[in-house]
């Protein structure tokens, strides 16, 4: 998101144990619970900063920042409806929290709430970079939290009981949450040595390749940060790249694009996936890892009719289907369109003996003809300035890992100042 902090701001707002813990919430409906969190945090030796983001009434106790009074005390001029009010509060609170963190005034954030309170709290927390404590006590934490947590390191704690006054059960949970955010804010660990970082995408069918590449690049002196390309993982990698955390990206598992096309298990990527990082020239080596297949949630006992003409690899509650000619062409065109947006950033290396453990000679998804169709379409649509290298390897061959590692190293060195 455009509001996210830059690395310079992150460095300027490095973790400070003396900085306050921000207690953010809808104090007009959850005053007692947030006052309890404030007290339990302060009893542990931390200062607090209270931020009221309710849209119905002013805070019933003096808050350090009351967005209701700021936005709505004069009738909320220009704000129509509850949805607009919530958006206004989130925007204001995100700006405040971002600035206070970058100035070193807060070292973490905590909130408690139901559905709306969780939406408000986590939306505000997401402006903070990875590694900053973010704790959300929520009545809906046991539900699907994919959209709520997003790509951020938010700790969700299920309230178990409803949040309606502090009682013997909720009090214990809130106190544990207060202890958690304080403990997180006291974190002092940092790596012994700063190294150039390479982001590496991977998923189960190409684990051997990822492990071998990681060993090779670490042997060259790099730090390798792996991301599971499961929809969220790929987007988390793109988000951290926008924060300037990586010197290179080895996009080994571009599988998410196939699942997005087929509404598969690893779907949910946004338009930023595989796109160049705005304002940064991060070299990216792209491999069609996992683009042979889409992973869908069915077993050999309930194969949907539309996939019965596909090659299928059954392995647990999910199955992988080989993309057909039409689907492979669609993915190739999408990859080309994304890479063409900044040709100087990309190189492509294609192992021609298979792109996953299910796509090798004798395996269920092996289909050299479909692979060749993908390669021809990709090369036809790619900007000619993008180097494409085809190699007679399987993606999980150690020799392919050595080659990919060497190309990545070369790309990073080309970007290094003389």
Image (cartoon, rainbow, N blue to C red):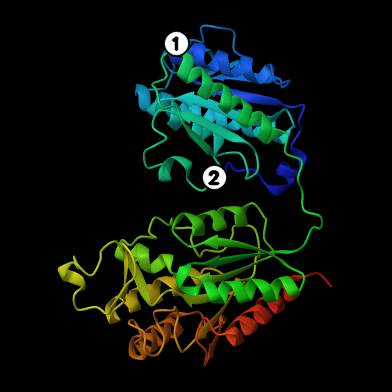
Q: Earlier in the sequence, mark 2 or mark 1?
A: 1
Q: Give the residue at x 63% y 27%.
A: 179
Disc 1 residue crowd, few under 14, some 14–19, many 20+, Cα 10 Å: some
Between circles 2 and 1, the one closer to the viewer is: 2
Q: Is residue 94 visible?
A: yes
Q: Is residue 136 found left or right of 96 in the rendered image? A: left
Q: Could you say where residue 193 lies in the image, as x and y percent from the top left?
A: 81, 58
Q: Give the residue at x 68% y 17%.
A: 42
Discs 2, 1 touching: Cβ within 8 Å: no
Q: Is residue 376 above or below residue 144?
A: below
Q: Could you say where residue 105 lies in the image, as x and y percent from the top left?
A: 73, 27
What residue would you read off at disc 2?
A: 152
The answer to which quarter of the image holds residue 376 is bottom left
The front one of 418 and 184 is 184
The image's mark for residue 57 is 1
Hey, which residue is sitting farthest bottom in the picture? 392
Q: Is residue 411 above or below residue 183?
A: below
The front one of 5 and 398 is 398
The answer to which quarter of the image holds residue 45 is top right
**Helix, strand or loop under label 2:** loop
Hey, which residue is sitting farthest right in the picture? 418
Disc 2 residue crowd, few under 14, some 14–19, many 20+, Cα 10 Å: many
Q: Is residue 64 visible?
A: no
Q: Give the residue at x 54% y 66%.
A: 201
**Helix, strand or loop under label 1:** loop
Q: CA distance from mark 2 to mark 1?
A: 30 Å
């Amino acid at each position: 998101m455009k509001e996210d902090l830059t690395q310079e701001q992150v460095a300027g707002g490095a973790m400070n144990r003396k900085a306050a813990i921000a207690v953010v919430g809808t104090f007009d409906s959850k005053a007692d619970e947030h006052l309890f969190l404030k007290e339990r945090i302060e009893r542990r030796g931390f200062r607090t900063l209270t931020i009221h983001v309710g849209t119905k009434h002013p805070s019933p106790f003096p808050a350090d920042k009351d967005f209701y009074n700021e936005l709505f005390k004069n009738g909320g001029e220009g704000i129509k409806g509850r949805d607009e009010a919530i958006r206004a509060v989130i925007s204001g609170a995100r700006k405040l929290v971002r600035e206070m963190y970058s100035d070193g005034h807060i070292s973490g954030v905590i909130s408690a709430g139901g559905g709306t309170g969780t939406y408000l709290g986590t939306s505000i927390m997401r402006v903070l970079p990875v590694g900053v404590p973010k704790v959300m006590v929520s009545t809906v934490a046991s539900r699907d939290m994919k959209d709520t947590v997003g790509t951020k390191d938010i700790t969700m704690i299920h309230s178990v009981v409803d949040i309606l006054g502090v009682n013997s059960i909720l009090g214990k949970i809130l106190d544990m949450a207060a202890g958690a955010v304080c403990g997180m804010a006291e974190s002092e660990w940092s790596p012994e040595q700063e190294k150039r970082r390479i982001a590496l995408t991977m998923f189960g069918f190409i684990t051997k390749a990822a492990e071998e590449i990681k060993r090779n690049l670490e042997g060259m002196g790099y730090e390798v940060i792996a991301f599971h390309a499961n929809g969220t993982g790929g987007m988390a990698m793109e988000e951290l790249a926008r924060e300037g955390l990586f010197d290179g990206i080895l996009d080994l598992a571009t599988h998410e694009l196939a699942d997005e096309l087929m509404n598969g298990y690893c779907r949910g990527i946004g338009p930023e996936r595989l796109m160049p990082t705005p304002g940064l020239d991060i070299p990216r080596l792209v491999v069609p890892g996992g683009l042979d297949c889409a992973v869908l949630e069915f077993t050999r006992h309930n194969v949907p009719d539309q996939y019965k003409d596909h090659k299928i690899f059954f392995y647990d509650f999910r199955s992988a289907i080989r993309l057909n000619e039409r689907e492979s062409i669609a993915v190739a065109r999408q990859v080309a369109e994304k890479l063409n947006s900044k040709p100087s950033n990309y190189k492509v290396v294609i192992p021609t003996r298979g792109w996953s453990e299910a796509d090798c000679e004798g395996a269920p998804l092996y289909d050299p003809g479909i692979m060749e169709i993908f390669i021809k379409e990709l090369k036809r649509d790619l900007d000619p300035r993008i180097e494409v290298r085809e190699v007679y390897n399987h993606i999980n061959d150690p020799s392919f890992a050595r080659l990919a590692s060497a190309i990545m190293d070369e790309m990073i060195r080309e970007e290094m100042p003389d």
